[in-house]
Amino acid sequence: MNSIKMKNTIFIVTTFLLASPFTFAGKMTMPTDAPASYEAECASCHMAYPPALLSQQSWKNMMSSLSKHFGTDASVDPKTQTELTNWLVKNATTRQKYSETAPENRITKTSWFIRKHDEVRPEVWKRASIKSPANCGACHIDAANGVFSEKNIKIPAK
Ligand code: HEC
Ligand code: HEC
């Protein structure tokens, strides 16, 4: 390989790695050290979101305002709050390009989320079986296992 080709190859590989926060598939799945309180406290109203979907700052912000959580009260006792905050922050995304503090600390308001979903028409989000972009599992049939790949998507017709 000559040096120009080599540089191009490095460029392409690097671009690919930077372009996808999901290249390292393992990071998207639920870490095996998830405390039992995560499932118990954070998966009754929606799925237990894998911590790598949000930045450290977003998790800190969210965990310090649980009594005002998207129009509902999701508070937990102080011990659980500390346990969950530490674990979420430890497992938050560390990839700089994706570690913005999203509006409302929402996964669904991060720029990567918006970009990845730009082909979903606005009316699709409103279908009765979807209702909200935060309802990942309505389309990502294996979301509960942290799988968001293209092959595992089925958008409900209504
Ligand atoms: C009492 C119900 C309830 C509980 C308990 C709850 N949440 Fe939520 N959560 C909501 C609602 C409602 C929304 C907004 C959903 C929507 O916009 O469709 C939300 C949204 C979120 C979002 C943003 C989703 C997006 O739009 O990107 C995250 C992240 C989140 N919750 C994390 C947590 C964590 C962490 C816990 C546990 C400490 C928790 N939730 C417990 C009701 C709850
Ligand atoms: C209305 C259905 C729908 C909902 C709800 C939805 N998605 Fe998606 N998602 C899609 C579609 C369609 C794509 C684009 C797939 C493609 O690349 O062709 C996608 C792509 C993605 C990708 C990129 C996958 C890849 O291989 O590049 C990720 C990650 C993702 N979604 C995560 C989420 C998360 C997390 C949630 C919930 C907070 C969510 N999605 C909610 C339909 C949905």
Image (tube, rainbow, N blue to C red):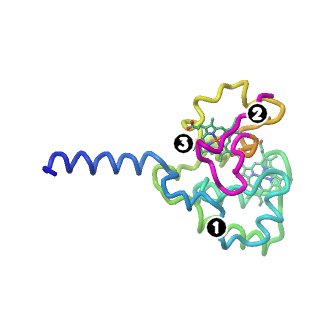
Instruction: Describe residue 133's horizontal placement relative to residue 111 as left or right.
Output: right
Q: Is disc 2's CB within 8 Å of ligand 2?
A: yes
Q: Which of 84 and 13 is in front in this view?
A: 13
Eyeballing the image, is 26 above or below 130?
A: below
Q: In which quarter of the image is residue 156?
A: top right
Tag 2 residue: 156
Residue beneath the point at 58% across and 31% down: 118
Residue type indicated by callout 1: Pro
Q: Which of 93 and 123 is in front in this view?
A: 123
Tag 3 residue: 112
The stretch drawn in magenta includes residue 150: yes
Crowd tier of the residue under label 2, counting other residues whose Cα lies within 10 Å: few below 14, some 14–19, many 20 or above? few
Residue type indicated by callout 2: Pro
| Residue 31, disc | 1
Residue beneath the point at 61% across and 65% down: 89
The tag earlier along the polypeptide, 2 or 3, is: 3
Residue bounds of the magenta highlight = 139-158
The quadrant in which the C terminus is found is: top right
Helix, strand or loop status at disc 3 = helix
Residue beneath the point at 72% across and 68% down: 84
Q: Nearer the viewer, mark 2 or mark 3?
A: 2
Q: Is disc 3's CB within 8 Å of ligand 2?
A: yes
Q: Which of marks 2 and 1 is in front?
A: 2
The stretch drawn in magenta includes residue 13: no
Residue type indicated by callout 3: Trp
